Image (cartoon, grey):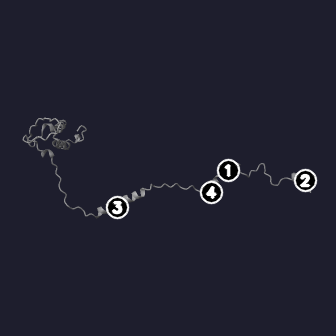
Amino acid sequence: MAGSDEEFEEFLKRRKPVFREPEDDLFEPPAELDRVVLRQAREAIKPEEPMRVFSAPRWSMPLALAATLLIAFAVIFKAGMPPDTAPKPEVTVQSITDRVETPSAAAPPPPEAPGTARVETATEPVVAAGEVPAWRRDPHAWQAEIQRLRDAGDIARAEAEYAEFKRAQRAYASSPDR
């Protein structure tokens, strides 16, 4: 039997192989094209990555619900109110400086706090009703008069003059040197 195996081996060596790779096969694609096709096939069957889901903070839903309820109640409350048909009072503007009384000479001076020096001020001339004092014609002089009243301790009258000054001189109303 050993002899028949040797003969069979020699027979196989002499015989042309049936399944051999041809050297110049024009019908086969290049190896690079095979790799590209296989890569695209793998990408096509690959499962889709899940979409990232962004969630809101835990407090956002209760806050949104509370805001919605607040707006809904406000709308319902406003819609449920009867229209206001009562006449509105007329607004009149009055100057507070006309109502401030000048301290008379007979009135006793306000009590002084211990340890404070009393500042003597010159009494200003009494201005006739309807006449505008000279210091009210110049904004800087008016501000100086307001400061003089504050320094003299007449805060109520100084504030009244300042309110009148703001009304009359809108450009100086928010003066930084108040």
Q: Earlier in the sequence, mark 1 or mark 4?
A: 1
Q: Earlier in the sequence, mark 4 or mark 2?
A: 2
Q: Nearer the viewer, mark 4 or mark 2?
A: 2
Residue 167 locus on image (x, y percent):
19, 44
Q: Is residue 138 in view?
A: no
Instruction: Name the quadrant containing residue 169.
Output: top left
Q: Earlier in the sequence, mark 4 or mark 3?
A: 4
Identify the residue shown where x is 87% and y is 53%.
Answer: 12
Residue 30 locus on image (x, y percent):
71, 49
User: Mark 1 and 3 residues: CB-CB less than 8 Å, in contact?
Assistant: no
Identify the residue shown where x is 70% and y is 49%.
Answer: 31
Q: CA distance from mark 3 to mark 2?
A: 102 Å
User: Mark 3 and 2 residues: CB-CB less than 8 Å, in contact?
Assistant: no
Q: Nearer the viewer, mark 1 or mark 2?
A: 2
List the residue tagged with mark 2: 6
Q: CA distance from mark 4 to mark 2?
A: 51 Å
**Badge 2: few (under 14), some or many (20 or more) residues near its Cα, within 10 Å?**
few
Is 131 in front, or is 143? 143
User: Mark 1 and 2 residues: CB-CB less than 8 Å, in contact?
Assistant: no
Vertical position of residue 32 compared to residue 74: above or below: above
List the residue tagged with mark 1: 35
Tell me the amino acid under the disc marked 1.
Arg
Is 147 in front, or is 5? 147
**Badge 4: few (under 14), some or many (20 or more) residues near its Cα, within 10 Å?**
few
Q: Earlier in the sequence, mark 1 or mark 3?
A: 1
List the residue tagged with mark 4: 45
Residue 92 locus on image (x, y percent):
16, 51
**Badge 1: few (under 14), some or many (20 or more) residues near its Cα, within 10 Å?**
few
